[in-house]
Image (spheres, rainbow, N blue to C red):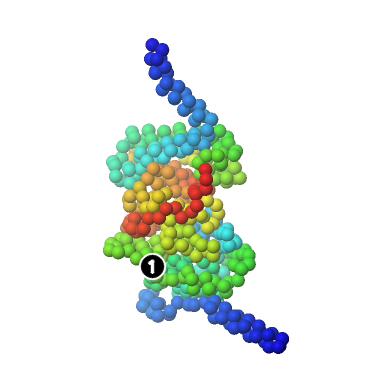
Amino acid sequence: MIRRAVLLIVLLAAIAGTGFWFATAPVRIDPALLAAVVPGDVQRGMKVFWQGGCASCHAAPGSKGDARLVLAGGVNLATPFGTFVTPNISPSKQGIGDWSLEDLANAMMAGVAPDGRHFYPAFPYTSYARMQTQDIADLYAYLKTLPPTDNVAGPHKLGFPFNIRRGLGLWKRLYLSPGPVLAIADATDAVKRGQYLVEGPGHCGECHTPRNAIGGLDKGMWLAGAKAAEGKGVVPNITDGEGGIGDWSEKDLAYALESGFTPDFDSLGGSMTDVVQNMAHIEASDREAIAAYLKAVPPHPNGYPTTPK
Amino acid sequence: MKELVGLAAAPILAIAVFCTSAVADPIKDRQALMKDQGKTVGSITPIIKGEKPFDAALVISALKHLNEDAQKIDLVTLFPAGTDQGGETTASPKIWEDSAGFEAALTKYKADAAKAAAAEPKDIESFKVVFNQVTENCGACHKAFRIKKD
């Protein structure tokens, strides 16, 4: 009888273990997605690089000007789940020098490393999953032209259970999807372009949308602002809802992205200053498209709790 | 007659009360100073954006006023310890944790503002150079030393 019970327990554990193993397996992108891609264009790739804000996290901390093109990593992102340390993504042995285009596409669109491990979603592949593969190919070509560095960024410092990478397979099943966030009726071309930039490469929602206890985005409060995932304070509401940007015009928004100045000539602060440096490099028409999209997003009140004054 | 005096005194009294409260409240004080700098920058930005023609007199007086405001920013009087709380302030605790870094940022801003005031740009191109140099301080300081709280 006892033997039977033990056997049953062992059997159940084995089934659960096998189930976990399969449910958490890294899923790569469909190779067919890359079939139609033409060799990347460096100039276009440079635009994608700034749209994606790669330098914000992958340039060495405090870099300015051309130093932001040396993607040595080593930026510490202190989050409630632990501290993530951004890796070297320069074209060197220590970076992504040996990666194929397929490797980069799998990293950015599926969160899977060349060795088959999951990446943590501090790397915003949940947004990059919505990118066009041609943009990834162009970015790949551009990244190859940047200066290599041998810097080895340290490991992440995470507590249990977040240190079990394999578990991310389950998380991805819940929160990783290449579909658009919003369905906007009668979207103009500018709104469509803005939607692509904001929901895809720009990954605006990763900071401006509140998250649940296990770090999944609350898409019902898309862009409503959130407690800062990294560091202190809050990230502003960028919808037209109360506390948001209802009194900003599209021109105001586009100019703020370009210059960092708000309509009342305050300047944007915090990590948005880095974003502005990135946005200053993209096409003016793309900044206008982002503004057009933001004005088409459903309004929400602030997505973070107000502390009593 | 008495009433007339009272009537006349009321606004003066109001101004006096307003002034003392401003002196006693570094948070309000520094916010007013920041707002004024924003207004000044706002008055010349349409020229940078190409929405208004270059106006040397306007630009030069604005840059001089911006410099006057910039020189007034002071860690001791406007950011006394403890004023990251008590009032609606977005000052980051980093101002006091890294006061040397804050002072260095202020020194740079003051130097750039003084240079901008002395430059007296005569055309749009030289104005753009001066404008960018002085306004890069806004974002740099707000990135490190300001925090949106709620």
Question: Residue B94 in the image: x percent, y percent?
Answer: 57, 46
Callout 1, which amino acid? Pro
Q: Position of residue A174 (x, y in %)?
A: 48, 71
Residue drawn 42% across the image and 60% down it: A222
- The relative height of residue A49 versus residue A40 in the rendered view (above or below) is above
Label 1, secondary structure: give it.
Answer: loop
Furthest toward the top, the residue is: B1
Q: Image point 34% across, 35% down: which residue?
A: B58
The residue wearing badge 1 is A180
In the image, residue A294 above or below residue A112: above
Q: Specify whether A41 is left or right of A17.
A: left
Residue toward you, A120 or B49 = A120
**Quadrant of the image containing the N terminus of chain A:** bottom right
Q: Quadrant of residue A24?
A: bottom right
Q: Farthest right residue?
A: A2
Q: Mark 1 belongs to which subunit?
A: A
- Looking at the image, can residue B77 be seen? yes
Q: Nearer the viewer, residue B42 or A229?
A: A229
At horizontal 50% and vertical 29% (from top left) the residue drawn is: B21
Work out whether residue A134 or residue A42 is closer to the camera in this orientation and state it: A134
Q: Is residue A4 above or below residue A153?
A: below
Relative vertical location of residue A295 with respect to residue B71 in this rendering, above or below: below
User: Which residue corresponds to the image point at 57% horizontal and 45% vertical from the top-left?
Assistant: B93
Please provide percent x and percent y for residue B139: 46, 47
